Image (cartoon, coloured by chain):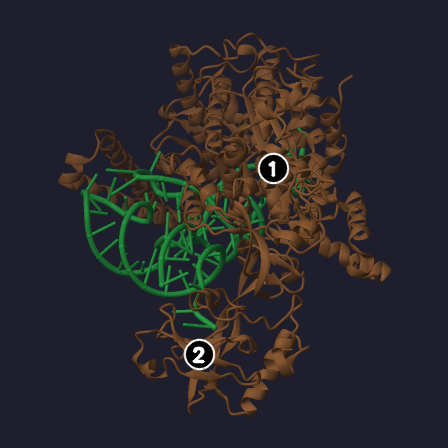
Amino acid sequence: MKEKFPPQYDSRSIETGVYEFWEKKGFFSAERHKKGRKKYVVVIPPPNITGFLHMGHALNNTIQDIIIRWKRMEGFNTLWVPGTDHAGIATQNVVEKNLLSEKKLSRKELGRERFIEEVWKWKEQYGSRIIFQLKKLGASCDWRRLRFTMDEKLSRAVNEAFVHLYNKGLIYKGERIIHWCCRCGTALSDEEVEYRDEDSFLYYLRYPLIDGGFIQVATTRPETMLGDTAVAVNPSDKRYKKFQGKKVKLPFVDRVIPVITDAAVEKDFGTGAVKVTPAHDHADFDIGKRHNLPFVTVMDGEGVMNENAGMFKGLDRFKCREEIIKELEKAGLLARTEPYANRVGCCYRCGSVVEPYLSTQWFVNMKPLAKPAIEAAEKDILRFYPERWKKVYLNWLYEIKDWCISRQIWWGHRIPVWYCKRCIEKDGNEKGIFVSADKPDVCPVCGSDEIYQDPDVLDTWFSSWLWPFSVFGWPEKTKDLEVYYPTNTLVTAQEILFFWVARMVMAGYEFVGEVPFENVLIHGTVRDKTGKKMSKSLGNVIDPVKIIEDYGADSLRFSLISMTASGQDVFLSPTFYIKGRNFMNKVWNASRFISFIVEKAEVKRVEFPERFENLNFPELWILSELDKVIKVVNDSLECFRMNEALNSIYDFFWHTFCDWYLEISKVYQEQETEYLREKVLPVLLYVHLTVMKMLHPFTPFITEKIWQIFSSYCVTETESITVSRWPASFTLSYAPHLNLLSRKEKGEEKEMEKEGERMKEIIEIVTTIRDIKTRFSVPIVKPIDCYFDRKPEGLSAALISRLAGVGNFLSFDALADDAGNVLIKNLRQGRLGMSFEGIINISAERVKIIKEKGKLEGFLEKIDRKLNNPEFLEKAPEEVREKEKAKKQQLQESIENLKKDIEFLDAKR
RNA sequence: GGGCGGUUGGCUCAGCGGUUAGAGCGCUUGCUUCACACGCAAGAAGUCACAGGUUCGAUUCCUGUACCGCCCACCA
């Protein structure tokens, strides 16, 4: 029962059931692979549960899948751990929005407990969309190990990590200026702020001095003036010498504030005098600390001006800005306004402008954690691909700041800090705090049950940074942790280098004592064809899910990888998938064709011999070409150059195997049935299946399907191509399957090279004949007589005859002095000639020949210059010199021949 | 202000110290050749951003310039 190939390539029918087959058989689970094998682990960057698969995910996961499938086929005990992260702020926002539109309820109306229930409900319903999409893409994760950052065990890990750091004195609570998102109502870490260029204004304000006169300050945020507690100038600024120590009466709030000096003030910017707002600016906060200034907060957590804002109380921050400018203008205190290109910080989740805000938050002291992470990169224990990211990583770690980890939202890991009401009443705030990984019943100090938990939750990244070991059960000492940690490779985009990669390294050292992975592969960002990031708001999104549905996951994966040089950003045009789609079709049809040949030859089942022997030169040629490709693919993958590997497979399969070898196989079909059955078919299938194997990590579905179908035509070594043995070049040390060509014998290799040359010669002859025929508008299929200096015989003649359409093979010696033949003879390197019934289009041909002659002469001149250069002769390697000389001679001959052609054509006129 | 990446045929991108710089799409011409028109065959098309330097030799290495993009930085 031979399974037939469907007549046309159709991604849907090919992909149907394939993934289920893999999963059912458990090919992706690490346990399936033999014990004692070397492990290879890739940890997936957990996509967040609110997300849909976008092009960045598609690229990222395809790269990981390629690595993991390749390593699996190489025989490693491979594990790819999948998961999702709870994305605190993003998820809370999504659910809140849903709630509002569906039930007309705000989060606060619902209350914390019930809101979190709602989030869980939402997560159950929508949280695994991305997982389904990853499966559609073909990601061969071990899905039974799917983890979620809010899982009980992972939450436990988060608590343990917190307690560990707290007890070590690396976590502290402090009042600081942090980034605050008024829309999300929470603190953000430095990394969670994105900067956007904005055309805004620089306002020059005149602050009245008590003694009379004014001092001018410049600001982009005039509304913060209400919280000013000083004006600062540079101590060495002569212009302001006379103002030092004077007092300013702040307009609207009538606060008297001093003019102070601070070295942080730039003399050359604005007016050289700065309004100092310690509660609303990072730099001013430092100045405020240095000079013991009061901290006046003028707005609340929602960006609304508070009671300290006097007459502006209740106004939104941006409205307030407008109003205050109006008022200042009225009072004659606005000196001038000038346009200013500003960079404003925005929330990376909702995009609204972030306020520097004074509040009490939890921080991690990062410097001590950074130390081993720095060392790992410096000593190349941790390697980056491409290497340049190492510098970026290190620079960030050298300058690392403390990490604000508390968030004023509800969805996330609640900070495992507890307060005892009684102890606080008795001993003050600092005494009544204790941390505990488990929920305590009573205060460990006084035994009171009047305890309550810190209301804040932790930054999502505080759980993500534990990922490489929390997924294996840490803090428990599990078998998994022992076997699979540290992992081997992390694949990610540059965007989360700091968010995630650097922090994972720090966590790895701090909590497990070992680097979490050895390779960090950083791929480019996917952008649209104008270089913009793809985003919904720009409307330039190309949806990978749609491409998968329409053209198949394989087409998408192929196209994406094929055009992505390692580490380079990818600019996608809307039709980028075409290359992949066309290639899939080609692969499909070539396979179908091969199945036809097998059927036609009436061979029940093709057997591969122990080793190939007594082959003709086309077979030796294709095998040696295959071998070259295997080598290139292996070398490229070894250094994560996916595109190089894939493109060389593409090139070989299409332009060597299909264009030439499959055409040659048609010649065999017309004759030599015995040889066809015993030699050609095995070689054909062997080459084809080997290519399928190499292609499998890149385009898993089609290759699996073909493997399944081919298992009825020949011996496929395994049930699934997923677990077949990865091809090795026979010049490498171990043998490919069935020991085919496994022994490296000098004689054999040389012979293959020689036969390869022979094949190349035939390709050249065929191409030349076709070229000439096309030039003279002779159909390729029309047989014509050709003259050769060395007359091809036997198989060579058969091939040339069939592929180029040759009637009689004639020898040059048979040529009379007919000048007409000289033209033909010389058309390409004087190797061959042919006779036509008539020569048409002579003058057009003359132009072509003259043009070609000119080109060759130019080239000859270049070589001549080179050869006449004594230094070249002296210093260039012998090899190069010889090559150049040979080239020159060849060129001279060709030019001579062309000259004769022109003479002939001229005579003919 | 620092750091990084890019600039190669009409478009999207590979590549490389030494054959006449490649691919896909598009284009031209010819093919209903019995696997494939998502195809076959043949072809046109590039002063490899610009200026210097190193070298026997540079599109490739170095320096500078221009433009595009990214990241980092408390000049309000």
Q: Quadrant location of residue A18? A: top right
- Name the kind of residue labelled 1 in the image: Trp
Point out the residue furthest to the right here.
A103
Residue sitting at 36 percent across and 49 percent down? A851
| Vertical arrangement, residue A5 with respect to residue A190, above or below | above
Viewer-nearest residue: A894 or A843: A894
Q: Residue at x 58, y 88 (%)?
A: A327
- Which mark lies nearer to you, 2 or 1? 2
x and y percentages locating residue A889 in the rendered image = 25, 34
- Where, quadrant-wise, is the N terminus of chain A in this rendering? top right
Chain ID, green in image: B
Counting from the top left corner in percent of width and height, residue A830 is at 35, 33
| SS label for mark 2 | strand
Identify the residue under disc 2: A258
Which residue matches tag 1?
A467
A510 over A591 or under it: above or below:
below
Q: Colour of chain A?
A: brown
